Amino acid sequence: MILGEILVLHIISKIVGTIFGVVISEIGIRLIGTGSQSLSLAYDPNTFFLAFGVAIAGGIIGGIYLAYRASKLAPTEALRYE
């Protein structure tokens, strides 16, 4: 259950982060590139897929660690902090 929740959060944050990064990059290029030398951005789908894979791998590793810690915790200890 913990691993599934963490993967969903990582996927959503990766999508939002990618959109935010592209929008901020485009805004920055339009603000900076107003002179005689204009800049342009090129997006490679392979870069997005690689970043998505790294985010998923990090989510899986983090999720396994948290699930392991949760499995070692006594239920009464977990409820004490609720």
Image (cartoon, rainbow, N blue to C red):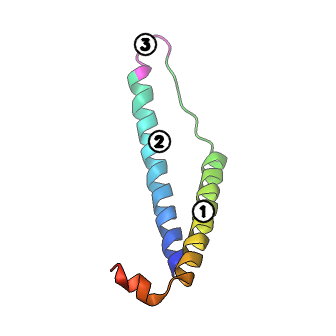
How far apart are labels 2 and 1 at the CA level? Answer: 20 Å
Q: Earlier in the sequence, mark 2 or mark 1?
A: 2
- In this view, the residue in front, 7 or 21, is 7
Residue topped by disc 2: 22
User: Where in the figure is residue 45, as x and y percent of width and height?
Assistant: 62, 48
> Residue at 54% across / 72% down in the picture?
66
Q: Earlier in the sequence, mark 3 or mark 1?
A: 3
Residue topped by disc 3: 35
**Of labels 2 and 1, the one closer to you:** 1
Magenta-colored stretch includes residue 35: yes
**Quadrant (top left/top right/bottom left/bottom right) for the C terminus:** bottom left
User: Where in the figure is residue 42, as x and y percent of width and height?
Assistant: 58, 35
User: Magenta stretch?
Assistant: 32-37
> Residue at 39% across / 32% down in the picture?
27
Q: Quadrant of residue 31?
A: top left
How far apart are labels 3 and 1 at the CA level? Answer: 40 Å
**Is the residue marked by circle 3 packed among few (<14), some (14-19), or many (20+) residues within 10 Å?**
few
Which amino acid is tagged 2? Answer: Val
Q: Secondary structure at mark 2?
A: helix
Which amino acid is tagged 3? Answer: Gly
Which amino acid is tagged 1? Answer: Ile
Q: Quadrant of residue 30?
A: top left
Magenta-colored stretch includes residue 67: no
Determine which of the numbered discs, if any, sits on residue 56 in the image: 1
Verify CB contact (< 8 Å) between mark 2 and mark 1: no
